[in-house]
Image (tube, rainbow, N blue to C red):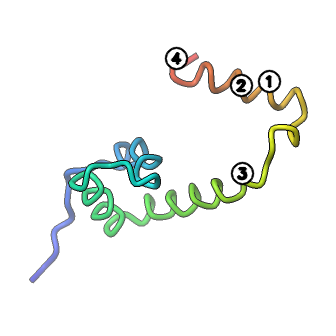
């Protein structure tokens, strides 16, 4: 029996769902699609590994650890992220 790669979930869609996936906040059917995609896509599997590593590293940071200018730059970037500015 040959396996067929599921096409239901594109890489871009997986990236958009990743935070909810890690938080356990996805419906079971969507979570299953994410897990199936990860079986077949080494790029997204690596992205997930890097995402988890980033989360682990940033948990050790406190707001006070950032210089004021860096904090301002990050706030500016996040404010304009969704707006495409």
Using a 10 Å C-alpha cutoff, classify the residue at mark 4 as few (fewer than 14 neighbours), some (14 to 19) or many (20 or more): few
Dot 4: what SS?
Answer: loop
Tell us which disc is closer to us: 4 or 1: 1
Residue 83 - label: 4
Q: In the rendered structure, are the residues bearing label 2 and label 4 in contact, judged by CB atoms less than 8 Å apart? A: no
- Residue 56 versus residue 8: which sits nearer the camera? 56
Identify which residue is drawn at 33% across, 69% down: 39
Q: Eyeballing the image, is 25 above or below 72?
A: below
Q: Earlier in the sequence, mark 3 or mark 2?
A: 3
Residue 75 - label: 2
Q: How far apart in space, not on screen, are marks 3 and 2 (Cα)?
A: 16 Å
Identify which residue is drawn at 72% across, 57% down: 57
Q: Earlier in the sequence, mark 4 or mark 1?
A: 1
Q: Position of residue 45 (x, y in %)?
A: 45, 64
Q: How far apart in space, not on screen, are marks 4 and 1 (Cα)?
A: 18 Å
Q: Earlier in the sequence, mark 3 or mark 1?
A: 3
Using a 10 Å C-alpha cutoff, classify the residue at mark 2 as few (fewer than 14 neighbours), some (14 to 19) or many (20 or more): few
Q: In the rendered structure, are the residues bearing label 1 and label 2 in contact, judged by CB atoms less than 8 Å apart? A: yes
- Residue 11 versus residue 66: which sits nearer the camera? 66
Q: Position of residue 42 (x, y in %)?
A: 42, 66
Q: Specify the farthest residue to the right.
A: 67
- Whether residue 56 sits left or right of residue 8 in the image: it is right
Dot 1: what SS?
Answer: helix
Q: Eyeballing the image, is 10 above or below 75?
A: below
Identify which residue is drawn at 42% across, 47% down: 20
Residue 72 - label: 1
Q: How far apart in space, not on screen, are marks 1 and 2 (Cα)?
A: 5 Å
Q: In the rendered structure, are the residues bearing label 4 and label 3 in contact, judged by CB atoms less than 8 Å apart? A: no
Residue behind mark 3: 58
Q: Position of residue 23 (x, y in %)?
A: 46, 52
């Amino acid at each position: 029996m040959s396996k067929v790669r599921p096409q239901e979930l594109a890489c871009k869609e997986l990236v958009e769902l990743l935070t909810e996936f890690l938080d356990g906040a996805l419906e079971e059917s969507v979570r299953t699609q994410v897990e199936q995609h990860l079986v077949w896509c080494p790029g997204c599997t690596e992205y997930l590994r890097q995402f988890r590593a980033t989360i682990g590293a940033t948990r050790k940071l406190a707001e006070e650890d950032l210089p004021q200018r860096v904090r301002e730059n990050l706030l500016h970037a996040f404010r304009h992220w969704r707006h495409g500015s």
